[in-house]
Image: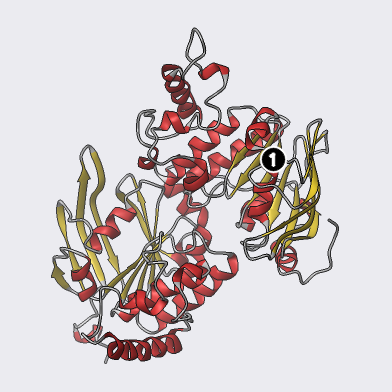
């Protein structure tokens, strides 16, 4: 006889009951109720600002709910802090890893949970437990390696391992694939499926609906702080989830596979060579050209020269060898383009890391919106042109915010206060607003919700239709296939293939990304 037939049904792993949370005037969560079945993967999706991360922060004890209560395995609990969450078997892996770069992996696991007064004795026991966990879960980590020297995929595994070491049976993952390559993502999914089979309950916060459909058993959609849909994965589709998230139908499809007609040459680079800090070739003789009215996608596993290519073409780094023609200007390795001159020649650049290279987080939005262009005549204070015309900058920023749907529309708000998607839209507004002849854009939708993705894709297509040459670097093959007219594939700092969009599919590009197909032109 089953437990349920005897009246002893297994309770949910987690129940959130009418949870409400307000931050000043902002109602982050409004009477949210959710039930998570044990040993399942439950997706929580929604646009940036929908309230999903706040809800999970309440479950993990970072915040206290204003109203409502939480049940864990059928018992009503009060979780005052993360220590109490851990004691209840709840672990959380944050989007931005909570690790100390200068410590080893094993020391990071022990930090805050030291097992004994004599660390050397306790460390031996910790190592044995971690090795057993790695054997059971497949989460392989180099325990004695310094965290600062590890690739992103291994850092992700370390964070999960750390949570499991501390007894997590309920695991919260906040945008776990935002910085992973497709291969690392698939490896993570294999691990999560294994953890589910071992009885772990997984709450997956994400905006990637393709991943939700592939991994989750059930999904809850949040919008404006409320639950608008909860369903089994078998009963829904990406289109239904996208509509529930945004409140309207969303179209990310390409629509056709017809490449743009080749027009005037806008940028041409030949023989680009560059070595990284360890002397390893990052660019090994790369050739590329961009023409007006087309989007050229650069595909490849992260770390194969795409980032260096963007930096060299934008004038941020000078190559050791190579030539560049931008408009009617020519540059050689010894006398390379600078970012200032690039802007004068109508080349705009949306960097891969918006926080480090795209904005100063402490600046208000109006300063971020003018960053790099602040010496233009339109921004100079009259009558002598000395200093900056801050009033005009704020007015211009308000107009950019309206055109690019940046929320909230407050030029005085600090750049760090905007969600990732709205930060990205502000940077795009700044660069596209200069009406560039060439736009270099790296990872345009990394960490961005589906509504913002649709908007950003639309802006890039519009810019190309108006005659701009766009170079798009993205780790998302779906994005490359949705936007590009021509695709260049990189592996090991080399171009391993160049194809028209009609010849592209995930399998073909994947082989070229792994350098397992013959080179098809450079």
Q: Secondary structure at mark 1?
A: strand
Along the line of sight, the residue nearer the viewer: 360 or 202: 360
Looking at the image, is 458 positioned above or below residue 378? below
Q: Residue furthest right?
A: 521
Residue 405 seen in the current view: no
Nearest the eye: 455 or 84: 84
* Residue lying at 34% horizontally and 91% vertically, measured from the top left: 124
Bin the neighbour count of mark 1 within 10 Å (Cα to Cα): few under 14, some 14-19, many 20 and up: many
Q: Is residue 119 left or right of residue 330?
A: left
- Which quarter of the picture shows residue 204? bottom left
Q: Is residue 443 visible?
A: yes
Q: How is the image coloured?
A: secondary structure
At a point 72% along the width and 50% down the height, the residue shown is 319
- Direction from residue 93 to residue 282 in the image, left or right: right
Looking at the image, which residue is at 35% across and 82% down?
199
Give the quadrant of the C terminus: bottom right
Question: Which quarter shows the N terminus?
Answer: bottom left
Residue 231 position, x and y percent, is 38, 62
Image coordinates of residue 485 in percent, x first then y, are 75, 46
Residue at the far front in the pictured view: 334
Q: Position of residue 341 (x, y in %)?
A: 67, 32
- Image label count: 1
Residue that numbered label 1 is attached to: 470
For residue 315, side relative to residue 128 (left or right): right
Q: Is residue 203 left or right of residue 248?
A: left
């Amino acid at each position: 006889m089953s437990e349920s037939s005897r009246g002893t049904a297994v309770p949910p792993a987690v129940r959130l009951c009418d949870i409400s949370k307000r931050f000043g005037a902002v109602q982050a969560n409004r009477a949210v109720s959710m039930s998570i079945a044990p040993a399942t993967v439950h997706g929580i999706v929604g646009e940036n600002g929908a309230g999903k991360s706040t809800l999970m922060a309440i479950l993990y004890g970072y915040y206290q709910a204003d109203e409502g209560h939480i049940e864990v395995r059928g018992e009503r609990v009060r979780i005052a802090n993360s220590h109490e969450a851990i004691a209840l078997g709840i672990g959380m892996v944050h989007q931005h890893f909570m690790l100390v770069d200068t410590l080893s992996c094993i020391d990071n696991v022990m930090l805050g949970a030291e097992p004994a007064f004599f660390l050397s004795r306790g460390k031996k026991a910790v190592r044995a437990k971690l090795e057993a966990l790695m054997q059971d879960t497949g989460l392989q980590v180099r325990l004695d390696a310094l965290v600062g020297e590890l690739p992103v995929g291994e850092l992700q595994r370390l964070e999960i391992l750390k949570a499991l070491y501390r007894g997590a049976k309920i695991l919260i993952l906040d945008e776990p694939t935002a910085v992973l390559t497709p291969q690392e993502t698939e490896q993570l999914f294999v691990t999560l499926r294994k953890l589910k089979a071992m009885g772990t309950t997984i709450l997956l916060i994400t905006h990637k609906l393709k991943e939700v459909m592939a991994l989750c058993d059930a999904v809850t959609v949040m919008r404006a702080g409320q639950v608008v849909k909860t369903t089994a994965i078998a009963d829904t589709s990406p289109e239904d989830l996208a509509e529930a998230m945004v409140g309207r139908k969303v179209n990310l499809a390409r629509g056709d596979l017809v490449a743009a007609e080749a027009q005037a040459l806008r940028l041409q680079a030949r023989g680009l060579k560059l070595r990284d800090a360890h002397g390893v070739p990052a660019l090994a003789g790369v050739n590329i050209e961009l023409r007006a009215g087309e989007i050229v996608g650069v595909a490849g596993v992260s770390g194969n020269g795409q980032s260096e290519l963007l930096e060299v073409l934008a004038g941020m780094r000078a190559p050791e060898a190579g030539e560049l023609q931008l408009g009617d200007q020519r540059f050689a390795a010894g006398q390379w383009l600078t970012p200032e001159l690039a802007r004068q020649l109508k080349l705009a650049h949306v960097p891969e890391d918006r926080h480090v290279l795209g904005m100063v987080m402490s600046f208000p939005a109006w300063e971020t919106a003018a960053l790099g262009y602040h010496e233009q005549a339109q921004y100079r204070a009259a009558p002598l042109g000395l200093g900056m015309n801050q009033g005009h900058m704020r007015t211009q920023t308000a107009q950019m915010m309206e055109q690019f749907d940046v929320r909230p529309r407050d030029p005085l708000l600090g750049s760090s206060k905007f969600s990732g998607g709205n930060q990205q839209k502000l940077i795009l507004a700044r660069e596209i607003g200069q009406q560039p002849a060439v736009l270099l854009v790296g990872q345009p939708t990394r960490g961005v919700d589906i509504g913002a993705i649709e908007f950003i894709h639309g802006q890039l297509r519009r810019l190309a239709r108006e005659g701009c040459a766009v170079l798009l670097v993205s780790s998302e093959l779906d994005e490359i296939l949705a936007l590009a007219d021509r695709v260049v594939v990189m592996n090991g700092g080399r171009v391993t293939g160049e194809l028209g969009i009609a010849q592209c599919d995930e399998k073909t590009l994947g082989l070229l990304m792994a350098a397992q197909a013959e080179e098809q032109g450079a």
